[in-house]
Amino acid sequence: MTTTVLVTGAAGFIGLHVSRRLLDEGCRVVGVDNLNDYYDPGLKRARLAQLAGAGRFEFHTLDVARAAELAALFASSRPEYVVHLAAQAGVRHALTHPFSYVDSNLQGSTAVLEACRHHGVRHLVFASSSSVYGGNRKVPFVESDPVDHPVSFYAATKRANELMAHTYAHLFALPVTMLRYFTVYGPWGRPDMAIWKFTDALLRGRPIDVFAGGVLERDFTFVEDAAHATVRLMRTPPERSASDDPRRWEADGPDTSWAPFEVVNVGRSDPVSVNELLALLEARTGARAQRRELGMQPGDVERTFADTAKLQARVGLQPAVPLAEGLGRFVDWFRGYHAI
């Protein structure tokens, strides 16, 4: 029997690649997206066109914050699994548009959790972010590290999502895996992200804003690696502990959970500085960056660096595409998409 997976944010960057992988593996995919104008909706429609030829893909224009409409879709489509990627993204956008994060990331996610609870979903895979690690300085970042000091409102909403999801896992035995994605990039990426902006500026001869001298480091993860990890984890839901005995909490400490809930880093575990990133893009495009040096931006962090031991233990997977290779594939796609 064909497995049905509901993917929210299906017209988004990661949503496209996850949906494509699910279709390649024989699943029926029910895609949901509100096609908002945070960035060009034309790009979102072009992504959907990549999926439209698949007979097992259906798409619904729907805002997940509309709880009644979402519940009706769950009732009609009867998904066995849900991959919840829909969210208001962007660290800096949250400085000026915080309520859009409340609507999408908090209200919308509550509607998704409620729908999963009431419709017997076997496993909810839920996008979080490496941003939840905030200003943590101990590296690499491990899922058990404290994440109590977010430095952006976006990060705060994603940490809230983790806590909300854990509550549903505990109260309603809903299996949930939270994915802390680390700077995902690649073909069909987002225009608000640095790799897109840098590539666009290099190819068009425009200045590039470089913050904090270009020494900030990011753990860049190629999108096909991220999609592969997402689908592999979807197929391995966490299990509830055999015992809810409160004495276990006393023995193991307050960080112990017996709910069917896991948090998993999805990254390559190989941070690279912005200066190194720019050098690789210069080599690939054949253009020289016109740097405009600026200070540290509000909400930025010095580095991100994923410990991927749990990902490897859960599904035997380590994101493997090197940054130079992934950037080459992105630049080739970018040139083709924009006919540059």
Image: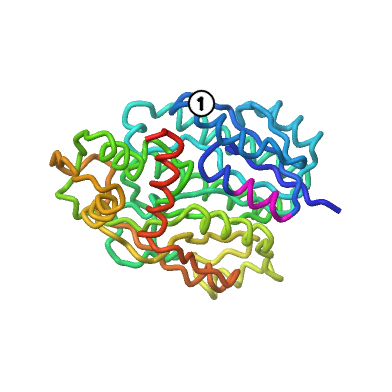
Residue segment shown in magenta: 18-25
Q: Is residue 109 above or below residue 247?
A: above
Give left or right: position of 15 versus 131: right
The answer to whether one can see residue 302 in this image is no
Residue at position x 30%, y 66% from top?
138
- List the single residue furthest toward the top: 37
Residue at position x 51%, y 37% from top?
87
Give the image location of residue 76, x and y in percent.
81, 34
The part of the image, by quadrant, that contains residue 250 is bottom right
Which sits in the foreground, 321 or 119? 321
Q: Main secondary structure of the magenta part?
A: helix
Quadrant the C terminus occupies = top left
Give the image location of residue 305, x and y in percent.
35, 62
Give the image location of residue 153, x and y in percent.
37, 38
Give the image location of residue 318, x and y in percent.
50, 69
Tell me which amino acid carries mark 1. Gly
Q: Is residue 245 above or below residue 161?
A: below
Residue at position x 60%, y 69% from top?
315
- Was residue 228 drawn as part of the magenta stretch in this picture? no
Q: Secondary structure at mark 1?
A: helix
Which residue in the protein does label 1 denote? 42
Which sits in the foreground, 195 or 300? 195
The answer to whether one can see residue 77 in this image is yes
